[in-house]
Image (tube, rainbow, N blue to C red):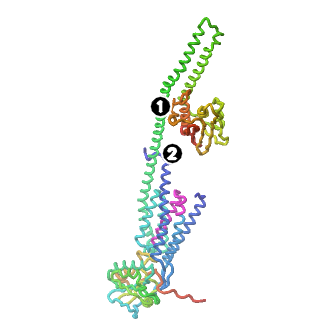
Amino acid sequence: VKFPRGRAAALIAGWMALASGGMVAFAWYGGRAGDAASAPAQWPAASHLRLDAQRPTLLMLAHPKCPCTRASLAELARLARRLDGRAALHVLFIHPDGTPTQWERSDLWSQAQAIPGVQVEADPNAEEASRFGGETSGQVLLYAPDGRLAFAGGITSSRGHEGDSPGADRIFEWVTRGATALATAPVFGCPLHDPAPREKP
Amino acid sequence: MNPADPLTPRAAALFQESVDANAARTSRVFAWLMVGQWLFGILIAALWSPYGWAGKVHSVHVHVWAALFLGAAISSLPLFLTLTRPAATPTRFVVAVAQMMWSALIIHLTGGRIEAHFHVFVSLAFLAFYRDWRVLIPATLTVVVDHLLRGIFWPESVYGVLNPEWWRFVEHAFWVVFEDVVLILACVRGVYEQRVMAMRQAEVEAKSTALEEANGQLERSREALAKLAEVGQLAASVGHELRNPLAAVRNGLAYVTKRAKDPNVNAQSLAQDPNVQKFLGLMDQELEASSKIIGDLLEFARERPLDLRPCPLTQLVDEAVSLVPPKPNVTVVNDVSDQTPIPLLDKENFRQVLINLIQNGMEAIPSGRAGTVRIRAEGGGALPWHISVADDGVGIPGDALSKIFQPLFTTKTKGTGLGLAIVQGKVKRHGGSIQVRTELGKGSTFHIELPGAAAPASSAA
């Protein structure tokens, strides 16, 4: 097959534009953070979870089916190794009403359970998630032993992408150096709650 | 041989052939890889992240669509080019860019696993199979541009921090460039070895050609020697053959001389002497036979280069027929069509072939009955020529059949036994072959096959 030079250049340029455009769109999707948590500044008294009085308490709110949360749990495992017991770690998997029993027992549940020192629990009807203002799977909240919110955000660098992240670094710094200011980081994952029903016109 | 020397035209052609073959081979690998990566991407996305969720509501995950459509877009042009223009330079550049895009896509489809980043380095190594270091440039640029743009717009997705130092992309690119340097050295070495191989092959070919020429000369000398030996044997045999006619001539001459010297015999009575008349006729006949033997011997021994020219077969057959003494009971039919393509023949040589075969055919028909000798021809153009001379004579007995092309073999009372040997020699020199099919009492067909449009194999001899 022979192409005139100009047509070949146009073909290659068109392909470059198509493929690069797709890559940019995909990168844009990967870098689009989920809704941030509106976490209470103080540990909610109504929570049935116990705040650790000796060390900071880290809580991850997770959707048991969200593929992006696999990276969040991988990063949590890394963070747990770095923290080496200097924080109490909890992972709460939502179990929305109307889903089958043990719906939350997914491979992510097993992945979370495999992290040493992590307490994994189901969250019926996402009540605790709502109590802590969680919106997006992989959202991590760090509370100081006195109940003060220290960090709210994600610990992955983009959607479903493992690797160094500003969130994990901030948590580590907060736990090891005891910073005072509230730290945040974008969170990447699936929404924890069903989409809001559209209003009829 | 010095690899730094400029390539000879043959070595340059071999080198280019080798470069193109390697490029085509590598492109075929990438064609498979483009399809394989696409399927792998779809599989990974379908297994790893089949659905996106919002509470208990789910839909097909963006990764699946990306693997399906973005993957198809990335693989499309390189796949097309590797299948249609595998050795072309733009093909490998497009492949290089696509392969690095696949690295980025697979890294993201697998959740940015560190292990998936090896795809970048393996891809660069694969691209080095082209042995063209230039392909590493677009590949590396793709990686650098990808990191640069992500670093600007989504810094945390690449560097894990929101405000990385401006030079952080250089650090990432460094490891790619480091591998590039190693691969460039490998490519340059590979090309050098291809060049050396091409030079060696060209040298071997040149030597082989010289050897073939020397072999050809040797073969021709051997054939000439064999011919000379054959001619030597023939000369002895011919000497023997000539003894009888010469003895008859000597006897006749002795009688005529004796009568001429007789004082009682005058010229008139000598001319009217029936014995003198008989002896003179006999002498003429025997001298004619001797002349035929010597003529055939010369024809058999003669080795002159063929003078190949376009030679219409119909006319050539007509000429041959006109030169054969007719026999009243034999009809010679020229069945060669005017439409038969014109072969390249040595006219004089091939006419002799036809004369000998036609004469043989006529002599095979007994005097007591009518018979026909028929000449046919077909083929030509790209096909071989098939020329046949068929008679409906007595046929050739089985014990004689295997010897008819041997010099001096004859079943005739007045034959030299050289006619068919001459025919076979001339046909062979035209690059053809001759065969005979015979049936006792029904006749014989001599079948000549000559090469088609191509020049005969021994035409240069």
Residue A133 coordinates in the image, percent (x, y): 45, 88
- The rendered magenta stretch, by its main secondary structure, is classed as helix
Which residue is rendered at x = 63% and y = 14% of the image?
A: B274
Answer left or right for B231 relative to B114.
right
Could you say where residue B313 lies in the image, as x and y percent from the top left?
Answer: 64, 38
Total marks in image:
2
Residue for badge 2: B9
Chain containing the residue with disc 2: B
Mark 2–mark 1 distance (CA, rounded to whole Å): 40 Å
Q: Residues within 10 Å of mark 1 (few under 14, many from 20)?
A: few
- Spot occupied by residue A122 in the image (x, y as percentages of width and height): 40, 87
Q: Amino acid at mark 2?
A: Pro
Q: Nearer the viewer, residue B267 or B430?
A: B267
**Frontmost residue, B38 versus B322:** B322
Q: Which quadrant, please, contains the N terminus of chain B?
A: top left
Query: Magenta stretch: residue B59 in it?
Result: no
Horizontally, residue B10 falls left or right of residue B261, namely left
Q: Find residue B385 and report its image quarter.
A: top right
Q: Position of residue B288 (x, y in %)?
A: 59, 22
Earlier residue among tags 2 and 1 = 2
Residue B103 among those drawn in magenta: yes
Residue A83 visible here:
yes
Q: Which residues are magenta?
A: B78-107
Position of B411 compared to B309: left or right? left
Q: In which quadrant of the rendered view does residue B165 lie?
A: bottom left
The residue singled out by tag 1 in the image is B226
Q: Chain of mark 1?
A: B
Image height of A103 relative to B426, above or below? below
